[in-house]
Amino acid sequence: MFTSLRSRLWLSYALVITIALGIVTLVILTFLIRNPLAARQIQERLREVQNIILTNPKQYIDNPSAIEQLKQPFDVRVLVFNSKRDLTFDSNPGDPKIPFPGRNIWTRVAQTVRDEKGQLWLYRFKRVTQDRILVVAAPRPRVPALNIFTDQFLLPVVEGGIISLFLSLILAYTLSRWVADPLQKVVYAAQTYPSEEMKSIPPRGPHEVQDLTRAFNSMIARVESSQKSQRDFVANVSHELKTPLTSIQGFAQAILDETADTPERRKQAAQIIYSEAGRMHRMAVNLLELARLEAGTADLKMFPVDVKALLHNIVDKFTLQAQKAGINLRLNTPEQVPTLIGDGDRLAQVFTNLVDNALKFTPANGQVILSAANAGAEMEISITDSGIGIPREALPRLFERFYRVDASRAGGESHGAGLGLAIAKEIIDAHGGRISVRSELGHGTTFVIHLPLIS
């Protein structure tokens, strides 16, 4: 019992409301005990007598007979003190003396004073003249607390308590449902996941519960994206390995069946087997490197890098290839290029991949330009070509593993396994930088890399 969140919330709210009602009841009961109905009625008599005297003070002050006539029907005691707080008149001189009463700030409703014998008197006082202070008093009644409770308190407390408790239980139940129901939906969704009917849970309830629901929806979206990425990864790897394995198996079978019955054919078969095996090896190495980069375990050797010299080496490396293809390859850098901290070999790998792709997809008489510029706290490096361009719908997926632009749409032929740009992005990310691309079919492509400079 009371093991679920809903029941515990309901019990908590009910207890809080019950305690609050109990405190209010105790306060009211204490007030009534200190100021019972009889005492409040006496206070009204004292106020009435005081008002009568103050209405015509000359008629009553220093006129014992007038005061005697006034006090009898109201059953009160009238006293007059001077400015020195000495008693100058007492309508009941035979009773125990009452000292000049001082105001009690803790009992503002019913002011009391004790006479010589310790009896409590209720009183009201008012300054009549500069030298006269009027005090009207009456004995404070003694009413048993049980009588107060039964006569004045029992019925309204029972009625109000029952109504309040009933309403509080309904409110507690509503609040517990408001908090617990959205959580229950999250629990049910977690228990039934994965499910074909799994949908995003609408955020409801308190702000914290809504935050939890949004976080759960976000987690499910990331899990589904990760699972889809894994499925795509397995499918892509299987597809990439299928072609070389088929070639290796076919030519190995030709050697075993002696279909390749001449030295030339056997050499051709062995060469194809060797080439396809090398292709599979490069794919495995790239996949391992990509996995290490994504996991953050890649061994990066971070040292100051001379970006200008690095880009010069890249241009020198591809100059002959560009000349054979009839492409103008050039480097644009300012005289002074700031130094950045990075792994020079890894950055060279990125620029090599981008320049190689640019040359492959740029026709004769085109151009490929490497540029470097200081962009505040970053180094901006761009590789721009005048090649065939990339379709707009392909740009968001360009850095995904195994993604290759459709050759028929790009106007060219796809090369490689589609891992180069994914590796390039991970290398740039590992350096705290970012890489982006902009392109338009028939108008070339520009890759832009931002790398942080030494602070």
Image (cartoon, helix red, strand yellow):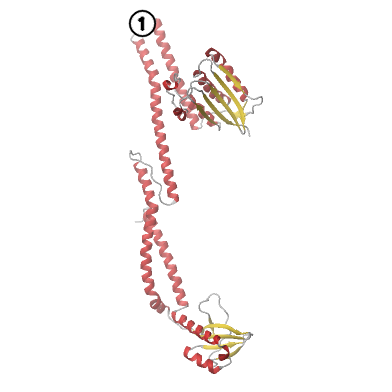
Image quadrant holding the C terminus, namely: top right
Picture layout, residue 209 above or below residue 156 = above
Q: In terms of depth relative to the viewer, which is nearer, 444 or 304?
A: 444
Residue at 37 percent across and 74 percent down: it is: 155
Q: Is residue 327 left or right of residue 29?
A: right
Residue at 38 percent across and 60 percent down: it is: 171
Find residue 413 and report its image quarter: top left
Residue at 37 percent across and 63 percent down: it is: 167
Picture layout, residue 243 above or below residue 49 = above
Image quadrant holding the N terminus, namely: bottom left
Residue identifier under label 1: 261
Q: Is residue 274 visible?
A: yes
Q: Residues within 10 Å of mark 1 (few under 14, many from 20)?
A: few
Picture layout, residue 425 above or below residue 37 = above
Query: What secondary structure is marked by label 1?
Result: loop
Which x, y percent locates residue 200?
A: 38, 42
Find residue 374 and report its image quarter: top right
Which x, y percent locates residue 35?
A: 47, 78
Spot the residue most to the top: 262
Find residue 83 and report its image quarter: bottom right
Which x, y percent locates residue 208?
A: 45, 50
Spot the residue most to the front: 442
Q: In terms of depth relative to the viewer, which is nearer, 17 or 308?
A: 308
Spot the residue most to the bottom: 65
Picture layout, residue 103 above or below residue 87 = above
Which x, y percent locates residue 230?
A: 40, 31
Residue at 41 percent across and 9 percent down: it is: 268
Instruction: Give amino acid for label 1.
Output: Asp
Q: Is residue 198 left or right of residue 417?
A: left
